[in-house]
Amino acid sequence: MAVEHPVTAPSGDQTRIHNIGYRTYDGPRLGRSYATRSLYSQSLRGSYGLGRSVKSKVLPMLLFVVMCVPAAIMVAVAVATKANDLPVDYTRYAIVMQAVISLYIASQAPQSVSRDLRFKTVPLYFSRPIETADYVRAKYAALATAMFILTAAPLLVLYVGALLAKLDFADQTKGFAQGLVSVALLSLLFAGIGLVIASVTPRRGFGIAAVIAVMTISYGAVSTLQAIADAQGSSSAVPWIGLFSPVTLIDGLQTAFLGATSAFPGAVGPSNGEGVVYVLAVLGLIAACYGLLIRRYKKVGL
């Protein structure tokens, strides 16, 4: 509690000096790395509504359940029917559930960054000791981790169920590992795109609408063009059209290198040579999203 200590002034002078008892901080200073880790952990918790109101937990937890329930049903069917394989490959599951994944990224990317922009708290982060790159890395890593948890959890359910159903251990382990690589790349790509779009506006509603529009319109347009090309006998163009949507980018990459079955019309996936282009496109988009976020927040932090 501050205590005033009036200092006696010369007679006739009304000047008074007050010592209100401020003290300097003498404790440990944990620095940038600790601040970055704290921002990462709090952002990750916020992606599932942890530490926030009950209303904030409903949508992310509901989407998490929606992602896992079909996997549990597939496992139950495989066990009950004594099937020789799972109904859906590990690498296909995220593609099948891409609508749920897009809804999750649309709801949580604006939650991660829009409030900081709306309430103008970003310059406070950059005052000290955290820097622009630290903020971007923490937010990007937190959302990508949340996405990975969302997409990897049902794969784990499938894997455990497959082992309980006594399916071939080597085949299931290989498929599970391929699925994890696929959803890791998907998480990085979707998180980057979602954050770039959400960082443009401080209004969360606008951010949600923009992310949904980009994800759904791009996928719908690309799928339609692929179907038209396949129907007209231009099957060689199908893989190249797939470069223009985040979902089809991941689909093509895992078809070329992770042994997945393509969801493209006519199951015409990219060859290994075309798959290299897919890899470069995915990695280039991830790097571009990171660079755009750095540039955006350097301007915001001024």
Image (cartoon, rainbow, N blue to C red):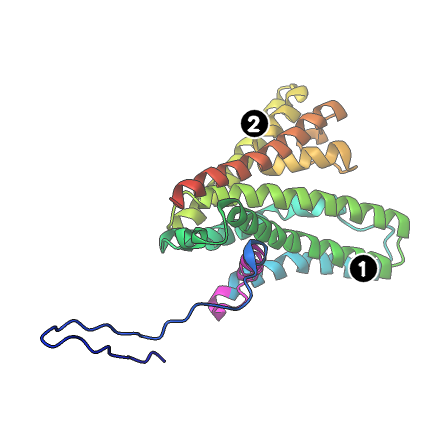
Image quadrant in which you'd find residue 269: top right
The part of the chain drawn in magenta is 35-56
- Residue 27 seen by the camera: yes
Was residue 40 drawn as part of the magenta stretch in this picture? Answer: yes
Residue beneath label 2, please? 225
Residue at the image position 55 percent from the left and 54 percent from the top = 32
Viewer-proximal residue among 301 and 190: 301
Which of pointers 2 and 1 lies earlier in the amino acid sequence?
1
The residue type indicated by label 1 comes to Val
Which mark is in front, 2 or 1? 1
**Place of residue 2 in the rendered image (x, y in percent of width and height, measured from the top left):** 34, 78
Does residue 9 sit above or below 264 in this rendering? below
Residue at the image position 42 percent from the left and 52 percent from the top = 122
**Place of residue 266 in the rendered image (x, y in percent of width and height, measured from the top left):** 70, 29
Question: Residue lying farthest left?
Answer: 12
Does residue 253 sit above or below 300 in this rendering? above
Residue beneath label 1, please? 160
| Figure disc tally | 2
